[in-house]
Image: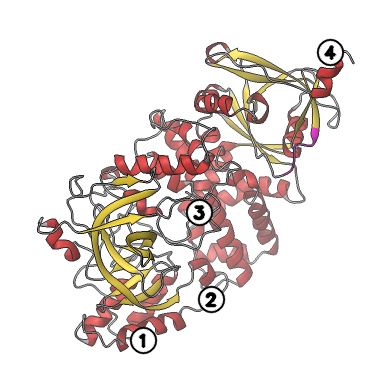
Amino acid sequence: MSPSQKRRRRGFEYNPLQFNSFRLLELISGHSLYADIHCRLRDYQLDSAPPYEALSYTWGDEKSACRISLDGLPFHIRPNLRDALRRLRQPRSTRIIWIDAICIDQNSADEKSVQVPLMRKIYTRAERVIAWLGEETFDSGIALDFIPYLTEVAKFDTESIWLFYLENYGFLRRMMSLVHLFSRPWWQRMWIIQEVALAPDVLVVCGSRHIRWSTFHVFIIAWMDVGHTSHYRNLSRLQITALRTLGMLVSGFSEALARLRLAIRTNSSVPQSFELSNLLWSFKYRSVTNPRDKIYGLLGLLSDHGVQVNYSKSPKEIYVSFFSSCLLEDRGLDWFRWMTGECYEPNKLCLPSWVPDFGPRAITPISSFLPNPVRGETQRVFFAAGQDRSRPLSTIQFEDDHRTLILRGRLSDVVSQCGRIFPFSDDIVLAGRATEPILSHWKKMAMDTQLKTYQSRTDRENAFWRTILTDRQIEGLHFKENAGWNPAQRLLPEIQYIPPKNAKEEQELLQAMENRQLCLNGRRFCITRKGRFCLLPPTASKGDLICILLGGEVPYVLRRIDNQSQDYYTMVGECYVHGIMDGEAISDILERKDVGDIFRLQ
């Protein structure tokens, strides 16, 4: 067998890249959609590359079973990329494109560790990014044609107009085509955030159809600002499902991306408010093939992040090291907003309980986001560990190669009674799940308690409603609905509806609660041994510990690992405990009269 035959049998092999260089794919012209795909791969310095486009697409779960010719040698790619190359191939001229699966040697951890940090420059310098949604389906064309039309309808904030359109079956059918379009995997991919946000221009391609990103952007903003706020009272189940489902898809996967791209195009850079902590939270629903990319996939948006990309390390090493550094750099425990205590999938990464997987969170955090004076937020909502968040009080230490986090604080109470879990707003609106039985069960627990922490029945009612609302005002009830950005506000000592004075006020309060995703959704009402009312994670159980951790905004539920190790715990999640949200439980520590307890979290 000749050397050329041996090389052909082995297939394409990458040559090492020089410093500050990258590869571009030359897609050779072809007249037939289904003709064999021929490409060439060329190396260039970043500063001297020819004009090129970049492809944004999903890899897919299928194996790389589709063969193309790369520099005259066999190279295997996945079906979705093959479909994209077929559609993008020009009939008479060569097209130059950057495609991660081909232009980066995916089998080389060292090369990926060098090339991934360059992606910010690669996408910024591309003439255009092509967003490939996939091949056409039976209703994708209907959806693309419907977007400009629905954008105009969404600008009407009149219930009668919505009812008029939604009673038309054809209108509903076209809305469902949009649901299918926004359900495509491309919208859920983490890497598209920087690919779209950084691009000078974006063209969305679906099979043989294409549409400019600006058309999508106008629709997304119009829908989120007005269209999704239509009232549900007079709508059928089908109409509610169409509105709600499209609203969830747009708000969950599209809105933050559209607003981020607009901010970057307006300011020529990522606004300071988009710190890595906020970006990770904003795009927590995005999916990745490689767990490392939950973090690495957002770094291109930031010019200064301090994270070293290293694909040679295990995901567990990366997550523990990254989160440890975040806690050390932060003045408190703001990153613990991830500790919502949800029932996650099996911990595939084998992370310590205090390290988040940065994945989806259905439960709303009780702790506030980092204060942002630009948006009018000047301070946090709660001060369970006091207002002084300086490092001398909240020293953070690690042991056992950073697998154990050591914090100080106070073991304040123990969980004694647990109520049932309150449903999520989508279960209430879409599935019609009743909330009254659970609230009645919770209220009976509160009113029947023999503990006298809250003396009178009125005190108990007041404490009960403030607990399940986490002492926060409700939009549309305590302040104007759609008032724009409004920082979370504590309930005033004397305020209407708290507690409800009669059945009418209680019904109005319950109606306002039902229309909002609140902190009580997905959590359970509980009572502690000291008789305090609290709102705990769904995974909390009797015997768990209510603890104040120095540097934290809210209390946390911890679980002792075993009776032999009195100061070793696992993190269950953050909580609201009425009466200790402003430092009351650790006044002696704050006054330096006591050093508090030691908690080793594993």
Q: Which residue is mark 4?
A: 3
- Determine whether label 2 and label 1 are within 8 Å by CB: no
Amino acid bearing label 4: Pro
Q: Which residues are magenta?
A: 62-66
Q: CA distance from mark 3 to mark 1?
A: 33 Å
Local crowd at mark 3 within 10 Å, few (<14), some, or many (≥20)?
Answer: some
Q: CA distance from mark 2 to mark 1?
A: 20 Å
Of badges 2 and 1, the one in the foreground is 1
Of badges 1 and 4, the one in the foreground is 4
Q: Nearer the viewer, residue 528 or 476?
A: 528
Q: CA distance from mark 1 to mark 4?
A: 83 Å
Comes first in the chain, label 2 or label 4: 4
The image position of residue 49, as x and y in percent, is 59, 13
Q: CA distance from mark 3 to mark 4?
A: 51 Å
The image position of residue 448, as x and y in percent, is 31, 89
Q: Which mark is residue 360?
A: 3
Of badges 3 and 4, the one in the foreground is 4
Amino acid bearing label 1: Lys
Q: Is residue 116 above or below residue 373?
A: above
Amino acid bearing label 3: Pro
User: For numbered disc 2, what is the local secondary structure?
Assistant: loop
Q: Which mark is residue 444?
A: 1
- Is residue 188 visible to us here? yes
Q: Which residue is mark 2?
A: 433
Q: Is residue 384 above or below residue 297?
A: below
Q: Residue at x 74, y 43 (%)?
A: 62
Q: Quadrant of residue 1?
A: top right
The image position of residue 216, as x and y in percent, is 57, 42
